[in-house]
Protein backbone atom coordinates (compact mmCIF):
# COMPACT_ATOMS: atom_id res chain seq x y z
CA UNK A 1 0.00 0.00 0.00
CA UNK A 2 2.68 2.49 1.05
CA UNK A 3 6.42 2.41 1.32
CA UNK A 4 7.47 1.65 4.88
CA UNK A 5 9.89 4.61 4.69
CA UNK A 6 7.02 7.01 3.98
CA UNK A 7 4.97 5.54 6.81
CA UNK A 8 7.87 5.94 9.24
CA UNK A 9 8.51 9.56 8.21
CA UNK A 10 4.82 10.46 8.52
CA UNK A 11 4.64 8.75 11.92
CA UNK A 12 7.58 10.75 13.25
CA UNK A 13 6.20 14.05 11.92
CA UNK A 14 2.77 13.26 13.37
CA UNK A 15 4.30 12.50 16.78
CA UNK A 16 6.05 15.89 16.86
CA UNK A 17 2.89 17.71 15.74
CA UNK A 18 0.83 15.95 18.43
CA UNK A 19 3.34 16.68 21.19
CA UNK A 20 3.53 20.29 20.03
CA UNK A 21 -0.22 20.80 20.29
CA UNK A 22 -0.33 19.22 23.77
CA UNK A 23 2.47 21.44 25.10
CA UNK A 24 1.23 24.77 23.70
CA UNK A 25 -2.49 24.14 24.30
CA UNK A 26 -2.62 26.33 27.43
CA UNK A 27 -0.25 29.08 26.29
CA UNK A 28 -1.05 32.69 25.38
CA UNK A 29 0.99 32.19 22.18
CA UNK A 30 -1.38 29.43 21.04
CA UNK A 31 -4.40 31.58 21.87
CA UNK A 32 -3.02 34.52 19.86
CA UNK A 33 -2.13 32.37 16.83
CA UNK A 34 -5.57 30.76 16.79
CA UNK A 35 -7.30 34.13 17.01
CA UNK A 36 -5.09 36.27 14.77
CA UNK A 37 -4.30 33.70 12.05
CA UNK A 38 -7.25 31.30 12.02
CA UNK A 39 -10.03 33.42 13.59
CA UNK A 40 -10.62 30.66 16.14
CA UNK A 41 -11.43 31.60 19.71
CA UNK A 42 -9.44 29.43 22.10
CA UNK A 43 -11.70 28.11 24.86
CA UNK A 44 -10.41 26.87 28.20
CA UNK A 45 -10.04 24.27 29.49
CA UNK A 46 -8.16 23.06 26.42
CA UNK A 47 -9.71 20.41 24.16
CA UNK A 48 -13.12 21.45 25.40
CA UNK A 49 -15.23 19.06 23.31
CA UNK A 50 -13.55 16.02 24.84
CA UNK A 51 -14.11 17.42 28.36
CA UNK A 52 -17.77 16.48 27.92
CA UNK A 53 -16.68 12.83 27.62
CA UNK A 54 -14.52 13.24 30.70
CA UNK A 55 -17.50 14.57 32.63
CA UNK A 56 -19.94 11.81 31.74
CA UNK A 57 -18.48 9.33 34.27
CA UNK A 58 -19.00 11.41 37.46
CA UNK A 59 -22.39 12.56 36.12
CA UNK A 60 -23.67 9.00 35.68
CA UNK A 61 -22.11 7.87 38.96
CA UNK A 62 -23.97 10.72 40.67
CA UNK A 63 -27.21 9.13 39.45
CA UNK A 64 -27.92 11.78 36.81
CA UNK A 65 -28.91 11.41 33.17
CA UNK A 66 -26.06 13.05 31.16
CA UNK A 67 -28.44 13.68 28.24
CA UNK A 68 -30.54 15.94 30.48
CA UNK A 69 -28.03 17.39 32.92
CA UNK A 70 -24.25 17.13 32.92
CA UNK A 71 -23.02 19.34 35.78
CA UNK A 72 -19.42 18.05 35.72
CA UNK A 73 -18.87 19.40 32.22
CA UNK A 74 -17.06 22.80 32.32
CA UNK A 75 -20.10 24.46 30.70
CA UNK A 76 -22.71 21.96 31.93
CA UNK A 77 -23.40 20.89 28.33
CA UNK A 78 -25.71 17.88 28.03
CA UNK A 79 -24.14 14.84 26.38
CA UNK A 80 -25.12 14.26 22.74
CA UNK A 81 -23.43 11.03 21.66
CA UNK A 82 -23.92 7.25 22.14
CA UNK A 83 -23.75 6.03 25.73
CA UNK A 84 -20.92 3.64 24.88
CA UNK A 85 -18.59 6.56 25.56
CA UNK A 86 -19.44 6.27 29.25
CA UNK A 87 -18.06 2.73 29.38
CA UNK A 88 -14.96 3.74 27.41
CA UNK A 89 -14.30 6.80 29.60
CA UNK A 90 -14.76 4.78 32.78
CA UNK A 91 -12.61 1.89 31.55
CA UNK A 92 -9.61 4.07 30.62
CA UNK A 93 -10.09 6.38 33.65
CA UNK A 94 -10.49 9.47 31.48
CA UNK A 95 -10.94 11.69 34.56
CA UNK A 96 -7.19 11.35 35.11
CA UNK A 97 -5.65 14.40 33.42
CA UNK A 98 -2.53 12.51 32.32
CA UNK A 99 -4.63 9.86 30.60
CA UNK A 100 -6.86 12.57 29.14
CA UNK A 101 -3.87 14.31 27.52
CA UNK A 102 -2.44 11.00 26.31
CA UNK A 103 -5.73 10.17 24.58
CA UNK A 104 -5.74 13.62 22.97
CA UNK A 105 -2.16 12.96 21.83
CA UNK A 106 -3.32 9.72 20.19
CA UNK A 107 -6.27 11.47 18.54
CA UNK A 108 -4.04 14.15 16.98
CA UNK A 109 -1.37 11.62 16.00
CA UNK A 110 -3.80 9.25 14.24
CA UNK A 111 -5.54 12.13 12.50
CA UNK A 112 -2.33 13.75 11.19
CA UNK A 113 -0.87 10.37 10.20
CA UNK A 114 -4.02 9.57 8.22
CA UNK A 115 -3.90 12.91 6.40
CA UNK A 116 -0.26 12.35 5.42
CA UNK A 117 -1.04 8.84 4.16
CA UNK A 118 -4.04 10.00 2.13
CA UNK A 119 -2.13 12.83 0.44
CA UNK A 120 0.60 10.30 -0.33
CA UNK A 121 -1.79 8.94 -2.97
CA UNK A 122 -1.90 12.24 -4.83
CA UNK A 123 0.13 12.43 -8.03
CA UNK A 124 2.34 15.37 -7.09
CA UNK A 125 5.81 15.91 -5.70
CA UNK A 126 4.30 18.34 -3.17
CA UNK A 127 2.59 15.67 -1.05
CA UNK A 128 4.07 16.90 2.23
CA UNK A 129 3.17 20.52 1.47
CA UNK A 130 -0.41 19.52 0.59
CA UNK A 131 -0.79 17.57 3.83
CA UNK A 132 0.46 20.50 5.91
CA UNK A 133 -1.94 22.87 4.10
CA UNK A 134 -4.83 20.57 5.03
CA UNK A 135 -3.71 20.14 8.65
CA UNK A 136 -3.45 23.92 9.17
CA UNK A 137 -6.82 24.65 7.52
CA UNK A 138 -9.27 26.24 9.95
CA UNK A 139 -11.45 23.12 9.91
CA UNK A 140 -8.51 20.96 11.02
CA UNK A 141 -7.26 23.51 13.53
CA UNK A 142 -10.73 23.84 15.04
CA UNK A 143 -11.00 20.04 15.19
CA UNK A 144 -7.71 19.78 17.05
CA UNK A 145 -8.28 22.83 19.28
CA UNK A 146 -11.60 21.39 20.47
CA UNK A 147 -10.16 17.89 20.94
CA UNK A 148 -13.10 16.57 18.96
CA UNK A 149 -13.54 12.82 18.58
CA UNK A 150 -13.99 13.22 14.83
CA UNK A 151 -10.20 12.76 14.79
CA UNK A 152 -10.42 9.13 15.89
CA UNK A 153 -13.43 8.58 13.62
CA UNK A 154 -11.33 9.90 10.75
CA UNK A 155 -8.67 7.29 11.54
CA UNK A 156 -11.18 4.44 11.86
CA UNK A 157 -12.69 5.27 8.47
CA UNK A 158 -9.16 5.52 7.05
CA UNK A 159 -8.46 1.99 8.35
CA UNK A 160 -11.73 0.68 6.91
CA UNK A 161 -10.85 2.04 3.47
CA UNK A 162 -7.41 0.43 3.37
CA UNK A 163 -8.69 -2.94 4.54
CA UNK A 164 -9.90 -4.79 1.46
CA UNK A 165 -11.13 -7.63 3.66
CA UNK A 166 -14.89 -7.12 4.01
CA UNK A 167 -15.10 -8.25 7.65
CA UNK A 168 -12.19 -6.12 8.86
CA UNK A 169 -13.41 -3.09 6.94
CA UNK A 170 -16.94 -3.49 8.28
CA UNK A 171 -15.67 -3.84 11.85
CA UNK A 172 -13.90 -0.47 11.62
CA UNK A 173 -17.03 1.19 10.20
CA UNK A 174 -19.21 -0.49 12.83
CA UNK A 175 -16.96 0.84 15.62
CA UNK A 176 -16.98 4.33 14.11
CA UNK A 177 -20.77 4.25 13.78
CA UNK A 178 -21.55 3.17 17.35
CA UNK A 179 -19.19 5.93 18.52
CA UNK A 180 -20.46 8.84 16.42
CA UNK A 181 -23.56 7.85 14.35
CA UNK A 182 -22.79 9.58 11.03
CA UNK A 183 -20.18 6.98 9.84
CA UNK A 184 -23.20 4.75 9.13
CA UNK A 185 -23.16 6.30 5.65
CA UNK A 186 -19.71 4.82 5.05
CA UNK A 187 -20.98 1.23 4.76
CA UNK A 188 -21.47 2.25 1.13
CA UNK A 189 -17.78 1.58 0.43
CA UNK A 190 -18.33 -2.18 0.71
CA UNK A 191 -21.29 -2.39 -1.68
CA UNK A 192 -19.39 -4.54 -4.20
CA UNK A 193 -22.03 -7.16 -4.95
CA UNK A 194 -25.41 -8.30 -3.65
CA UNK A 195 -23.94 -10.44 -0.86
CA UNK A 196 -21.78 -7.63 0.53
CA UNK A 197 -24.63 -5.17 -0.02
CA UNK A 198 -27.03 -7.20 2.13
CA UNK A 199 -24.40 -7.91 4.80
CA UNK A 200 -23.51 -4.22 4.99
CA UNK A 201 -27.18 -3.31 5.44
CA UNK A 202 -27.53 -5.85 8.26
CA UNK A 203 -24.39 -4.55 10.03
CA UNK A 204 -25.53 -0.94 9.58
CA UNK A 205 -28.93 -1.76 11.11
CA UNK A 206 -27.21 -3.53 14.01
CA UNK A 207 -25.05 -0.44 14.62
CA UNK A 208 -28.11 1.83 14.40
CA UNK A 209 -29.99 -0.23 16.99
CA UNK A 210 -27.19 0.32 19.54
CA UNK A 211 -28.06 4.03 19.82
CA UNK A 212 -31.63 4.19 18.48
CA UNK A 213 -33.11 4.91 21.93
CA UNK A 214 -30.86 7.94 22.40
CA UNK A 215 -31.35 9.42 18.93
CA UNK A 216 -33.67 12.26 19.97
CA UNK A 217 -31.05 13.51 22.46
CA UNK A 218 -28.40 13.64 19.72
CA UNK A 219 -30.53 16.15 17.80
CA UNK A 220 -31.85 18.20 20.71
CA UNK A 221 -28.49 18.47 22.53
CA UNK A 222 -26.38 19.43 19.51
CA UNK A 223 -25.62 23.15 19.51
CA UNK A 224 -24.70 23.25 15.80
CA UNK A 225 -28.40 22.96 14.96
CA UNK A 226 -28.91 26.62 15.92
CA UNK A 227 -25.81 28.00 14.20
CA UNK A 228 -25.50 29.36 10.66
CA UNK A 229 -21.87 30.49 10.40
CA UNK A 230 -19.14 27.83 10.50
CA UNK A 231 -21.54 24.94 9.90
CA UNK A 232 -22.81 23.08 6.86
CA UNK A 233 -25.90 21.13 5.85
CA UNK A 234 -29.46 21.66 4.74
CA UNK A 235 -30.41 22.39 8.34
CA UNK A 236 -27.90 25.24 8.44
CA UNK A 237 -29.16 26.55 5.10
CA UNK A 238 -32.74 26.47 6.43
CA UNK A 239 -31.73 28.53 9.47
CA UNK A 240 -29.68 30.87 7.28
CA UNK A 241 -32.69 31.51 5.02
CA UNK A 242 -34.81 32.55 8.00
CA UNK A 243 -32.07 34.74 9.48
CA UNK A 244 -31.31 36.30 6.10
CA UNK A 245 -34.95 37.19 5.53
CA UNK A 246 -35.11 38.56 9.06
CA UNK A 247 -32.14 40.83 8.27
CA UNK A 248 -34.13 42.37 5.42
CA UNK A 249 -37.16 42.54 7.75
CA UNK A 250 -39.23 39.85 6.04
CA UNK A 251 -40.78 37.50 8.60
CA UNK A 252 -41.39 34.16 6.90
CA UNK A 253 -42.93 32.68 10.03
CA UNK A 254 -45.63 35.35 10.19
CA UNK A 255 -46.24 35.43 6.43
CA UNK A 256 -46.44 31.69 5.70
CA UNK A 257 -46.31 30.00 9.13
CA UNK A 258 -43.07 28.28 8.14
CA UNK A 259 -40.20 27.25 10.42
CA UNK A 260 -36.66 26.13 9.61
CA UNK A 261 -37.84 22.51 10.00
CA UNK A 262 -40.40 22.97 7.22
CA UNK A 263 -37.74 24.50 4.98
CA UNK A 264 -35.34 21.66 5.83
CA UNK A 265 -37.89 19.00 4.84
CA UNK A 266 -38.63 20.84 1.59
CA UNK A 267 -34.91 21.07 0.80
CA UNK A 268 -34.46 17.33 1.50
CA UNK A 269 -37.22 16.54 -1.01
CA UNK A 270 -35.57 18.82 -3.59
CA UNK A 271 -32.22 17.13 -3.04
CA UNK A 272 -33.66 13.64 -3.51
CA UNK A 273 -35.25 14.77 -6.77
CA UNK A 274 -31.84 16.12 -7.79
CA UNK A 275 -30.19 12.79 -6.92
CA UNK A 276 -32.70 10.98 -9.17
CA UNK A 277 -31.92 13.42 -12.00
CA UNK A 278 -28.16 12.87 -11.57
CA UNK A 279 -28.72 9.11 -11.50
CA UNK A 280 -30.69 9.19 -14.74
CA UNK A 281 -28.08 11.43 -16.40
CA UNK A 282 -25.26 9.09 -15.40
CA UNK A 283 -27.28 6.08 -16.50
CA UNK A 284 -26.57 7.08 -20.10
CA UNK A 285 -22.83 7.28 -19.49
CA UNK A 286 -20.76 4.12 -19.75
CA UNK A 287 -17.92 3.94 -17.25
CA UNK A 288 -15.83 1.34 -15.48
CA UNK A 289 -14.97 1.81 -11.83
CA UNK A 290 -12.81 -0.43 -9.69
CA UNK A 291 -14.60 -0.67 -6.33
CA UNK A 292 -11.45 -2.19 -4.77
CA UNK A 293 -9.22 0.75 -5.69
CA UNK A 294 -8.17 2.70 -2.58
CA UNK A 295 -8.58 6.02 -4.33
CA UNK A 296 -12.21 5.18 -5.16
CA UNK A 297 -12.88 3.76 -1.70
CA UNK A 298 -11.51 6.94 -0.13
CA UNK A 299 -13.80 8.98 -2.33
CA UNK A 300 -16.83 6.85 -1.43
CA UNK A 301 -16.07 7.21 2.29
CA UNK A 302 -15.55 10.98 2.26
CA UNK A 303 -18.39 11.73 -0.16
CA UNK A 304 -20.85 9.48 1.70
CA UNK A 305 -20.10 11.12 5.06
CA UNK A 306 -20.27 14.65 3.69
CA UNK A 307 -23.43 14.15 1.61
CA UNK A 308 -25.21 12.15 4.33
CA UNK A 309 -24.32 14.75 6.97
CA UNK A 310 -25.25 17.57 4.59
CA UNK A 311 -28.74 16.20 4.00
CA UNK A 312 -29.74 15.06 7.48
CA UNK A 313 -27.62 16.99 9.98
CA UNK A 314 -26.19 20.40 10.74
CA UNK A 315 -22.48 19.91 11.39
CA UNK A 316 -19.70 22.21 12.48
CA UNK A 317 -17.01 22.91 9.90
CA UNK A 318 -14.48 20.59 11.52
CA UNK A 319 -16.39 17.70 9.92
CA UNK A 320 -15.34 19.11 6.55
CA UNK A 321 -12.02 17.32 7.16
CA UNK A 322 -13.68 14.19 5.77
CA UNK A 323 -13.54 15.88 2.37
CA UNK A 324 -9.80 15.19 2.53
CA UNK A 325 -10.73 11.60 1.63
CA UNK A 326 -11.98 12.83 -1.76
CA UNK A 327 -8.84 14.77 -2.76
CA UNK A 328 -6.86 11.92 -4.42
CA UNK A 329 -9.90 11.01 -6.55
CA UNK A 330 -10.28 14.54 -7.95
CA UNK A 331 -6.62 15.60 -7.95
CA UNK A 332 -5.47 12.58 -9.94
CA UNK A 333 -8.17 13.21 -12.60
CA UNK A 334 -7.72 16.96 -12.54
CA UNK A 335 -9.57 19.05 -15.11
CA UNK A 336 -11.04 22.55 -14.93
CA UNK A 337 -14.24 21.30 -13.24
CA UNK A 338 -12.42 19.23 -10.66
CA UNK A 339 -10.05 22.17 -10.08
CA UNK A 340 -13.07 24.31 -9.17
CA UNK A 341 -14.14 21.55 -6.75
CA UNK A 342 -10.69 21.50 -5.09
CA UNK A 343 -10.70 25.30 -4.69
CA UNK A 344 -14.28 25.26 -3.32
CA UNK A 345 -13.31 22.50 -0.89
CA UNK A 346 -10.29 24.39 0.44
CA UNK A 347 -12.14 27.70 0.77
CA UNK A 348 -14.94 25.90 2.63
CA UNK A 349 -12.40 24.34 4.99
CA UNK A 350 -11.10 27.86 5.72
CA UNK A 351 -14.44 29.60 6.16
CA UNK A 352 -13.45 31.13 9.51
CA UNK A 353 -10.63 33.05 7.83
CA UNK A 354 -13.10 34.38 5.26
CA UNK A 355 -15.43 35.50 8.06
CA UNK A 356 -12.54 37.42 9.66
CA UNK A 357 -12.70 40.08 6.93
CA UNK A 358 -16.31 40.96 7.81
CA UNK A 359 -16.87 44.26 9.59
CA UNK A 360 -20.63 44.84 9.39
CA UNK A 361 -23.63 42.54 9.90
CA UNK A 362 -24.37 42.62 6.16
CA UNK A 363 -20.76 41.55 5.49
CA UNK A 364 -21.41 38.40 7.52
CA UNK A 365 -24.59 37.83 5.52
CA UNK A 366 -22.87 38.03 2.12
CA UNK A 367 -19.80 36.08 3.18
CA UNK A 368 -22.05 33.46 4.76
CA UNK A 369 -24.08 33.19 1.54
CA UNK A 370 -20.88 32.75 -0.48
CA UNK A 371 -19.52 30.06 1.86
CA UNK A 372 -22.83 28.15 1.92
CA UNK A 373 -22.85 28.35 -1.88
CA UNK A 374 -19.37 26.79 -1.99
CA UNK A 375 -20.40 24.02 0.40
CA UNK A 376 -23.51 23.35 -1.66
CA UNK A 377 -21.39 23.28 -4.82
CA UNK A 378 -19.14 20.69 -3.18
CA UNK A 379 -22.25 18.71 -2.27
CA UNK A 380 -23.55 18.84 -5.87
CA UNK A 381 -20.24 17.63 -7.33
CA UNK A 382 -19.96 14.79 -4.82
CA UNK A 383 -23.59 13.75 -5.36
CA UNK A 384 -23.11 13.69 -9.12
CA UNK A 385 -19.95 11.58 -8.82
CA UNK A 386 -21.60 9.25 -6.28
CA UNK A 387 -24.43 8.48 -8.69
CA UNK A 388 -21.79 7.16 -11.13
CA UNK A 389 -20.85 4.54 -8.55
CA UNK A 390 -24.48 3.76 -7.76
CA UNK A 391 -25.24 3.34 -11.45
CA UNK A 392 -22.35 0.98 -12.01
CA UNK A 393 -23.24 -1.00 -8.89
CA UNK A 394 -26.75 -1.67 -10.18
CA UNK A 395 -25.46 -2.37 -13.67
CA UNK A 396 -23.15 -4.99 -12.23
CA UNK A 397 -26.13 -6.56 -10.49
CA UNK A 398 -28.11 -6.34 -13.72
CA UNK A 399 -30.84 -4.41 -11.89
CA UNK A 400 -32.78 -1.89 -13.96
CA UNK A 401 -34.26 0.96 -11.99
Image: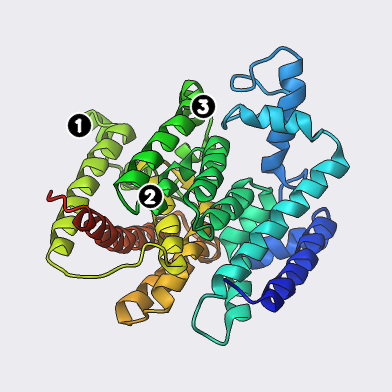
Where, by quadrant of the figure, is residue 70 drawn? top right
Residue 51 appears left or right of 102 = left
| Structural crowding at the residue carrying mark 1, measured as other residues with C-alpha within 10 Å and reported as few (<14), some (14–19) or many (≥20) | few
Give the mark, 2 or 1, whose residue is nearer the N terminus.
2
Asked if the residue at tag 1 contacts the one at tag 3, i.e. Cβ–Cβ closer than 8 Å, the answer is: no
Q: Residue 256 got which mark?
A: 1
Give the mark, 3 or 1, whose residue is nearer the N terminus.
3
> Which residue bears the numbered disc 2?
188
129 above or below 199? below
Asked if the residue at tag 1 contacts the one at tag 2, i.e. Cβ–Cβ closer than 8 Å, the answer is: no
Residue 158 visible, this angle = yes
Residue visible at 38% across and 49% down? Answer: 188
Residue visible at 72% across and 59% down? Answer: 109
Q: Nearer the viewer, mark 3 or mark 1?
A: 3
As rendered, which of 348 and 381 lies closer to the eye?
Answer: 381
Residue visible at 58% across and 37% down? Answer: 179
As rendered, which of 222 and 169 lies closer to the eye?
Answer: 169
Q: How many tags in the picture?
A: 3
SS at badge 1: helix
Q: Residue 210 got which mark?
A: 3
| Structural crowding at the residue carrying mark 2, measured as other residues with C-alpha within 10 Å and reported as few (<14), some (14–19) or many (≥20) | many
344 above or below 46? below
Residue 43 appears left or right of 79 = right
Asked if the residue at tag 2 contacts the one at tag 3, i.e. Cβ–Cβ closer than 8 Å, the answer is: no
Give the mark, 3 or 2, whose residue is nearer the N terminus.
2
374 above or below 315? below
As rendered, which of 159 and 138 lies closer to the eye?
Answer: 159
Quarter occupied by the N terminus? bottom right
Amino acid sequence: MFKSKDSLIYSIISIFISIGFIFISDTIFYEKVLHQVFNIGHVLPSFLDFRCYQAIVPTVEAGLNPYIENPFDPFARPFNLPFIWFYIARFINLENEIIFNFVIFLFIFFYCYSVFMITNLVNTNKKMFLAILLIISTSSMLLIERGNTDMIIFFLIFCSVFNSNFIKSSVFIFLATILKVYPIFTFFINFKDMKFFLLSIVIAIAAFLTFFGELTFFYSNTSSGNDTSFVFGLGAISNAILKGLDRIEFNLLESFILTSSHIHIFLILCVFILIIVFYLLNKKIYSTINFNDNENRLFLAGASIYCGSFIFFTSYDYRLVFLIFTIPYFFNKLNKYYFIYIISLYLSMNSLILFSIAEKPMDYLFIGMFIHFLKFLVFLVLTYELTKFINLFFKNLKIKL
